[in-house]
Image (cartoon, rainbow, N blue to C red):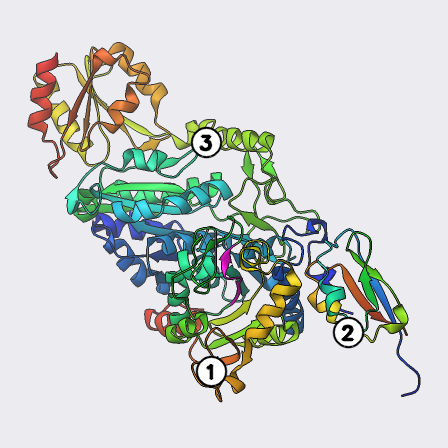
Amino acid sequence: MFDYSKYLRMDKLPHIWCYGCGNGIILKGAVRAIDKMGWDKDSVMAVSGIGCSSRATGYVDFNSLHTLHGRAIPYATGIKMSRPDLNVIVFTGDGDATAIGGNHFIHAARRNIDLTVVLFNNNIYGMTGGQYSPTTPQGYFASTAPYGHIDPSFDIVQLAMGSGATFVARSTVANPREMEKFIHEGLKNKGFSLIEVVSNCHERFGKRNKMKSPYEMIEWIRSRAVSKVKAETMEPEELEGKIITGIFRQETRPEYVEAYDSFVMQKAGGGN
Amino acid sequence: MAGKKEFLIKINLDFCKACGLCYSYCPTKAIGPDHEFRASVKDVAKCIGCLQCENYCPDFAIEIEEKK
Amino acid sequence: MGEIKFLQGNEACALGAVRAGLRFFGGYPITPSSEIAEQCARLLPRVGGRFIQMEDEIASIASIIGGSLAGTKSMTATSGPGFSLMQEALGYGIMAEVPFVVVNVMRGGPSTGHPTGPSQGDIMQARWGTHGDHPVIALYPESVPETYYEIIRAFNLAERFRQPVVFLMDEILGKMNESVEIRDDIEIIPRRKIEGDPSRYAPYAMKEDIPQTANYGEGLRFHVTGLFHDETGFPDVSGDNIQRSIDRMFRKIEEHEDVIGKWEETGTVDPDILLVSVGTQARSAKMACKELNREGISAGVFRPVTVWPFPEKRLAELSRKAKKVLIIEMNKGQLADECRKFIDGDKIIALNQLNSEMISPREIISTAKGVL
């Protein structure tokens, strides 16, 4: 039995998320992964933006910061620049990180600053009532896509890879243990880590798309999940609409603040 | 190892939002819905300690403990 | 006597900030403020601080809010378009009561406007740029030496009141060079270290209306949000709490005007014509005043150094005795409009110019003579 109460602000529960919301499953996976790191809670800094995902910071008994829509990553960047010894985790969503915060996401990945970004991808703007996001699949319905959605989606894993992230993984709420493992691997990486977790929003997305219950929607996610290893044997047409899961990149590159201190500060004659 | 492992199923009804994920994923139907669709123990002897319910519960409302 | 340095305004701003304890700067290049970022990039790593060039102005201000909450004195610098982009996060800083400094070297606007021309067009944006009701502290020096000392005061006010401070400059001030005496005896207010019982710590418990917020990572775990919150830092959007919070935030600034407020009075005491001007434009007003005095005309200058909160009590007092109040600005009359709230409208003469040039002493003199 895992003692979640060690890491939670129990007086803030039950949380505000809807019944069956995958965000709670992700929060639990993240907490178990953090526990494996054995960190002192005072050394953990949780930062979030705005949206359903970003309410996560209110429930964890760490240093916590609920910022502006899209801006969790630059706030976290400033914290890391100020206190590199803190273990900084960002909880964000598909809208928060890839629409309004897209610019910050790619630049933090490019710098390889030591942040672990857990991105709750529920394919929709849940908190504001179900408007389409950069990851709403084409052909589905949203409150702002009443005739069906035409926008192509971001592939967040490819976006992170192209931007230079040194740890990139994707899992889903249909596989909580795999998700936990990937978050743990991300936390271990000294650099920018992105763990995308595909989640269910049956309330704002599912109900408009013939998936009323959390169970139906999680099963829909499971039915589309294909491991990276298996995907490599499949044809592009077969992979249409699938969610490829796995660790896509795990490599070492100089971390931003370490590089600043060892190069810039040394040359400037500062440092300790 | 002799003997079957036994488990305790702890449900916190203050946190349960009746989403049904725990009993939907319970492979032995040790748990099921109560009259308000919240989690309830149906037959604790059937629990095999797979933790599916605990892992899927988004609300920190169910815990499985192995009896020592 | 301290060391004398010949400095550019933007350079003095960076040097003063580092002297005040600045150790983290997040910024984005924009004319005419870029030298401030360049100087910080050069100076900060020498003193164990860090500089980062962010991807835009929104990220810049977000990064310094994070840096400050984690215990490091932080600053960003920008100009009109960048200042517009920073407004939302400036409001966050006011709401979450985070100390930091935002420098805005004013250029001609709106929009891209005139990047290399001076302006005083952001006086009102500094006051009301972010949404919602909120108090603001904004300082605006007139010279390079004053820039050096006022940026230090900006940091001190930020720390003391846990409030972002807007530091206004203008293109003329940012780019001009003057001698600055670097004194040794400068008061620097350090970042407070808060101690308490971690199990019962309330980051927004107030002492004289000022929150007693710790720094992240020093053993007191707490939550910060841009939502209205109670003393524990967690959201409370009840009507009562919203009313109480805004009233208290205003009180925090308004009831300390004795510390925050600052202005200069020169020329004739209780003059017939009172010239009101801020920033570099005030230097032209002071020169005009001297000339008017030499000609025997009863004239004085009132120059707010703290622009917000506006020193209206003192100005109202002086205005009662004056026949005319001539308000001289490189904008459409933003301060003149503010003055109409508390000065008899018939007394107010607004002298405004938007052609990217400072209003000359000659124009001020002829306007003054024309209205007396």
Q: Secondary structure at mark 2?
A: loop
Pair 1/2: label in front = 2
Query: What residue is pinned by disc 3?
Result: C253
Residue assigned mark 2: B27
Question: Do marks 2 and 3 share a subunit?
Answer: no
Dot 2: chain letter:
B
Residue type of the residue flagged with mark 3: Ile
Residue located 48% across and 38% down the image: C161
Residue highlighted by disc 1: A251
Q: Quadrant of the C terminus of chain B?
A: bottom right
> Given the image, on which type of amino acid does mark 1 rest?
Glu
Which region shows up in magenta? Answer: A117-125
Residue C155 locus on image (x, y percent):
40, 45
Labelled pair 1, 2 in contact (Cβ < 8 Å): no
Decide: few, some or many residues near mark 3? Use Cα within 10 Å; few <14, some 14-19, many ≥20. many
Q: Residue furthest right?
A: B3
Residue occupying the point 36% across, 65% down = C45
Secondary structure of residue under mark 1: loop
Give me the C-alpha separation between circle 3 and circle 1: 50 Å
Q: Nearer the viewer, residue A138 or A175?
A: A138
What is the C-alpha distance between the residues marked 1 and 2? Answer: 38 Å
Q: Is residue C232 left or right of residue A245?
A: right
Whether A119 is among the magenta residues is yes
